[in-house]
Image (tube, rainbow, N blue to C red):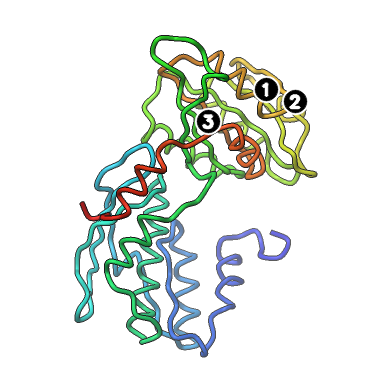
Amino acid sequence: TDILGDKITQIASEKAGIISVDGRSVVLAPQRYDEAADVVRNAADDVPVPLVDVGADYSAEPAGVEPWGQWFRVERRNPRPGEQPRSLHLLPLLGRHQIDNALTALATIDALVAAGTVAVPSDALHRGFATVRWPGRLESFDLPDSFGSSEPGGPPTVVIDGAHNAESVQRALDACRDYFPHEELHVIFGALGDKALQDMANIIQTRTGHVYATTSDHPRARPPQQVADAFADSAWSGELQVHLDPQDALSAAGQRAHSGDLILVLGSLSLAADTRRFLSAPTQAQMARRAEDPTV
């Protein structure tokens, strides 16, 4: 905010400053705030430079989901000659916002193809979406036996997300609700010193009764007790544990959670990276098989 400003229109105006007459076109992603979109549209008109309005020119809907990814259908509202108006794609990333991101990437490719800058066959587009990887973004794992309980139903699922502000934490929690049906939610949480700790904690408190405060191997990571204080100083009455490192936190959550529960790790990308070292993702082989023919 020190550089971009503290209002949506200010931030949009600063970012729209990159628009220049040298650009072939501007691709505007779907926007939550109409006022931000208006700033970008006006900036493109002033230059002038053609604008691709993804929210107006394209639409996408979820078409199926699995723990390792999702399918989505795209409709181009104004397809150019040779373009398919409708298509189905596999995306190994979860969350509705990732569909919006993929749609924006598709619109950008269409603009480059239309300008004669690149040639992208439809099968290459399918493969590109189907093989994308973004570690630490709603990434699911089987909890190793060494961390889990010995219940007959098996260990709980672990989801890791690098969410590190209030909005992304809310999205991660919503995605876990939508994509990973569970009984109780156990949150392993840590944050860096320059992030809005209390804002994130306030959101987490509304969604879980089990928090494991910890830290990561990052020079700006907050100490575990400082993270815990964000919960202890509120009216929240859930179970709060403090652990010196994510391995201990994961072990405690694995022993406390039941087979139908979900363990969510979030708060920083460094915490996501530190926790991933103790886990393995058996679904990568499934992703590779589907990438061979992502339209099936």
Kindly indicate the quadrant of the structure image that contains residue 211.
top right
Disc 3 is placed on an element classified as strand
7 relative to 95 in the view: left or right: right
102 relative to 281 in the view: left or right: left
Task: Return the residue at label 1.
Answer: 248
Indicate which disc residue 4 carries: none
Task: Return the residue at label 2.
Answer: 244
Label 1 close to label 3 by CB (< 8 Å): no
271 relative to 29 in the view: left or right: right
- Residue type marked 1: Asp
Label 1 close to label 2 by CB (< 8 Å): yes
Residue 278: percent from left, percent from top: 60, 32
Q: Residues within 10 Å of mark 1 (few under 14, many from 20)?
A: some
Indicate which disc residue 264 carries: 3
In the image, is residue 156 above or below residue 40?
above
Q: Residue furthest top?
A: 151
- Residue type marked 2: Leu
Q: Residues within 10 Å of mark 3 (few under 14, many from 20)?
A: many
